[in-house]
Amino acid sequence: MGKDGPGRPAEVGTSLNEEKASLRRAVFYGRRQARKLPAIAHDLLAGLLPRVRATVPPDLTDFDSWELEIGFGGGEHLAARAAAHRDVGFLGAEPFLNGVSMLLQAIDRESLTNVRIWPEDARLLLDALPDASMSRIYLLFPDPWPKRRHEKRRFLQTEMLDVFARVLKSGGELRFASDHPDLMDWMLARADAHAAFTGGLVEAEAIGTRYERKNLARHPARYAAYRRF
């Protein structure tokens, strides 16, 4: 994720160099890759990713309903929803290549044809989305940036809620979750104060990610759902 002020996404028909220049203008906080990628990951990144990579602006003509997950991690939640709802299109934004490669494996294994991946800063994709184009947006366990001086790096700023309000359909839903108490209070306060949304805490849902299985037994999470007016 980054901070305020990303460059505008490239328009359709612009050159690859122009798109790369636009991407360089976005400030990204976080890792692009951790452990060494296995051979199968390299094969999928080279072969499958170009076929499922989201365009900017994205092509949303294949499905009547679309959902977006920002920072999908290993892709378990996104892949499970895509497998259960094959008549819905799913956009996933995740710049961490290890996570992208895991979702690509699920796409290949489950023959998912309704998933598009944006392996860059999510703000660039959001900026290019048409108004009222998403039925749901997920922000699950984002980086808490716990130090006060880093709070501006948190993703769910009021300005980002403005963007979510623009791209969500009327009646569309924003769902977010965290096991970090301060971050969750921060996100709830901003969502509660935003004029375009109504909602609050909801019962825990079994998202089924590796992070959830590994950490949530020790760090209870809270889940929220807000509906766009």
Image (tube, rainbow, N blue to C red):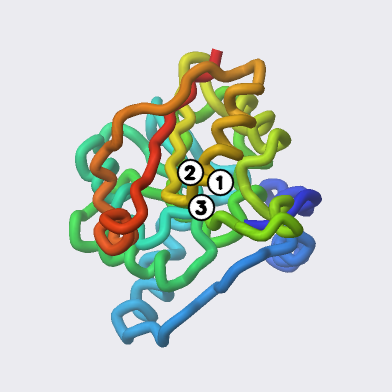
**Label 2 belongs to which residue?**
139
Cα–Cα span, label 2 and label 3: 7 Å
Which residue is painted at 21% across and 54% down in the image? 111
Q: Position of residue 69 (x, y in %)?
A: 45, 45
Which residue is painted at 51% across and 41% down in the image? 184
**Label 3 belongs to which residue?**
142
Of the image marks 1 and 2, the number of the one nearer the N terminus: 2
**Label 1 belongs to which residue?**
182
Task: Quadrant for the N terminus, please.
Answer: bottom right
Mark 1 closeness class: few <14, some 14–19, many ≥20 residues within 10 Å: few
Check if mark 2's residue and mark 3's residue have beta carbons within 8 Å: yes
**Quadrant assignment, res 126:** top right
* Kind of residue indicated by mark 3: Pro
Q: Is residue 93 above or below residue 59?
A: below
Task: Quadrant for the C terminus, please.
Answer: top right
Left or right: 62, with 196 as reference point: left
Q: Position of residue 158 (x, y in %)?
A: 70, 34
Of the image marks 1 and 3, the number of the one nearer the N terminus: 3
Mark 3 closeness class: few <14, some 14–19, many ≥20 residues within 10 Å: many
* Kind of residue indicated by mark 1: Asp
Q: Position of residue 197 (x, y in %)?
A: 57, 19
Label 3 residue SS: loop
* Kind of residue indicated by mark 2: Leu
Q: Position of residue 150 (x, y in %)?
A: 71, 58
Does any portion of residue 107 appear in the rendered image? no
Q: How many marks?
A: 3
Q: Is residue 26 above or below residue 57?
A: below
Q: Is residue 32 above or below residue 14?
A: below
Label 1 residue SS: helix
Cα–Cα span, label 1 and label 3: 12 Å
Which residue is painted at 52% across and 15% down in the image? 170
